[in-house]
Amino acid sequence: MNFKTAIDYRKQSLRKLLTVVESNEKKIIRALYDDFKKPEFESILSETGFVLSELQHTLKNIERWAKPKKVLPLLLNFPSSDTIYKEPYGKVLIIAPWNYPFQLALCPLIAAVAAGNQVVVKPSELTPNTSKMIAQIIAETFDREHVTCVEGGAEKATELLAQPWDYIFFTGSVAVGKIVAQAAAAHLTPVTLELGGKNPCIIDQSADLPLAAKRIVWGKFFNAGQTCIAPDYLLVHQNIKSDLIHLIKKEIVRAYGENQEISPDFARIINAKNWKRQVSLLQDQTILFGGKNSETDFFIAPTLIDEPKLDSLLMQEEIFGPILPVLSYQNEEDIRKVISRYAKSLAFYVFSNNEKFAKKIMGSYEFGGGCWNDTMIHFANKRLPFGGVGQSGMGAYHGRLGFDTFSHQKALVRKANWLDIPIRYAPYHGKEKFLKKILNWLS
């Protein structure tokens, strides 16, 4: 099968994937729960539902995305016609993370298949039940020479990275992203790196505090905070800090109950190693709310920390869990002093009804993407690129941009033979003035 040109075959494969995912949705949701007690609602919203929506959107638009695009030819090349062709890179490696193990394996796969590539998917070994489901779904859907799933741990990932690929797509931590980039560089392989960072969330005096509290709690504690675009810390104007903290506490109880450990709507930390790391971040901190934890099922309650020192372990790296530091500020210089300590973030959030302030703050810092008066929802719009900048990642995808990410845009000029202007040919003597006149006219 020629995967490069067979649009019908790509569509057939994606339709079959749609059917297989739909028929296995309950099993996928169960696997996610077995891996880290992910609530069914969150699994549908951020995993199976997201994947099914991406499939439907891709099937609807793939022919339009793949169609060659005519562009205006250069007068200097007259007479000619110029076209951009979308061609697959070839053999693609996708390495998926554990925090959204189904979505972040399947969505890049959908884009890579739509673009005509052959794909190897390496799901996370930290979510073995979901990894097994991904392997079963891929085996049931695709010819082995078209798409293959390779399960295993870090050794298997290292083995795969040592092979030559035409494109590598990685989602995960900054530390591992550097390893992937180094391995790709050995073969000059292009990469997309979806990483993370310390995402600030700024709340000024004009914000709608009850609504801000509700949206912050949802964005921070969804998936137990194990989200690369979750707010990592709050920067709150000192005049409203106590009011906002009161509202956030109230909202946590409303969402998860007085005892969050028995809430069916709160996920768990992925494993013992990550649980111990999260608990260590609480040491020597002033806990405003929460702090309860249990190693039995890797539970850590939604927790608020008051004014942690910026050189503390908590504020040195991405938290990636249900711990939310609350810092105060008086002016924009205070904001700058905190945010400038960190590399460019993957996400950035501002809660404010002061348009001038919000636009100035969001325009003053570089970040992958963000929201004004909400959290995380920019991820859901297929018309928006999703990706980082600097240490938070490189490249972007979703929707059409995902198709383009896995496509080489090949330029082709078709020159007509009925006219051949001789000025470009040697000998050049005496043509310089005429050439400058033409170039000035064309500009």
Image: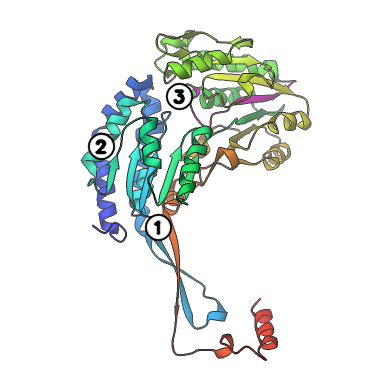
Numbered range of the magenta stretch: 225-238
**Residue highlighted by disc 1:** 65
Q: How many other residues sit within 10 Å of disc 2, few (<14), some (14-19) or many (≥20)?
A: some
Q: Is residue 402 above or below residue 85?
A: above
Q: Which mark is residue 113?
A: none
Identify the residue under disc 3: 223
**How far apart are labels 3 and 1 at the CA level?**
33 Å
Q: Secondary structure at mark 2?
A: helix
Could you say which quadrant of the image residue 343 lies in? top right
Where, quadrant-wise, is the C terminus in this rendering?
bottom right
Q: Is residue 232 magenta?
A: yes
- Which of marks 1 and 3 precedes in the sequence? 1
Q: In the image, what residue occupies the spot 30% across and 25% down?
A: 129
Check the image and report above or below for 101 versus 148: above
Give the percent coordinates (x, y) of residue 12. 25, 51
Residue of label 2: 137
Q: CA distance from mark 2 to mark 3?
A: 24 Å
- Looking at the rendered structure, the secondary structure element under dot 3 is helix
- Amino acid, disc 3: Asn
Of the residues tagged 2 and 3, which is closer to the observer? 2
Evaluate if marks 2 and 1 touch, with contact meaning CB atoms under 8 Å apart. Answer: no
Mark 2 → mark 1, Cα distance in angstroms: 26 Å
181 horizontally vs 389: left or right? left
Compare residues 76 and 22 and report the one nearer the observer: 76
**Which colour style is shown?**
rainbow
* Residue at x 40% of width, y 66% of height: 68
Mark 2, mark 1: which one is toward the viewer?
2
User: Label 1 sits on what residue type?
Assistant: Trp
Give the mark nearer the N terminus: 2 vs 1.
Answer: 1
Magenta span includes 51: no
Q: At 45% from the left edge and 13% from the top edge, which residue is drawn?
A: 299
Quarter placement of the N terminus? bottom left
